[in-house]
Image (cartoon, helix red, strand yellow):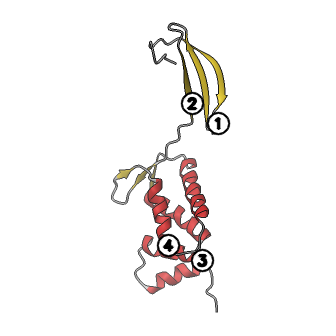
Amino acid sequence: MKCPFCQNEDTQVLDTRVSEEGDAIRRRRRCSKCDKRFTTYERIELSMPIIVKKNGSRTEFASSKLRGSLMLALRKRPVAAEAIDTAVATIEEKLLTSGRREVDTGYVGELVMQELKRLDKIAYIRFASVYKNFEDLAEFQEALAEVGHPRK
């Protein structure tokens, strides 16, 4: 590790601790040349896969867009904010653990539909009708049959 003061590459670790949040390693270091002390942090670097749109363009994953889609489908539905946070975290985890560097929007859409089906059937139908571009009543009926039998 280079000293930030004199750029010397010979530094000594004096103390190593886990950060207060538990998400990083904090190291206290001393430069052997200028004798100044400084702190470094080691953090896990996770990178979300790139999203490939239907037209072939690529964009960075945006958690805010994912949350916005879920919120739109769940608008005026009795679903707690914590459940939405959990759904977003679950989708992000699945994207990270997929091991893929790029994923298409179809894959992300399917993950969203899985979570909505678990959270709220009405929100699932709302999202599916737009996502799958329903054009007639038969497609709605298929989606309804997929989530369960209607009440009598």
Q: Nearer the viewer, residue 24 or 87?
A: 24
* SS type, badge 3: helix
Residue 141 location, x and y as percent? 52, 84
* SS type, badge 4: loop
Q: What is the spatial separation of the Cα atoms under label 4 and label 3, in whole angstroms?
A: 19 Å
Q: Are marks 2 and 3 in contact (CB under 8 Å)?
A: no
Q: What is the spatial separation of the Cα atoms under label 3 and label 1, in whole angstroms?
A: 44 Å
* SS type, badge 2: strand
Precedes in sequence: disc 3 or disc 1: 1
Residue annotated with mark 1: 20
Q: Residues within 10 Å of mark 4 (few under 14, many from 20)?
A: few
- The quadrant the C terminus occupies is bottom right
1 or 4: mark nearer the eye: 1
Q: Left or right? Give the position of 68 relative to 22.
A: left
Residue annotated with mark 4: 75
Precedes in sequence: disc 1 or disc 4: 1
Q: Residue furthest bottom?
A: 152
Residue annotated with mark 3: 147
Residue 63 location, x and y as percent? 48, 54
Residue annotated with mark 2: 42
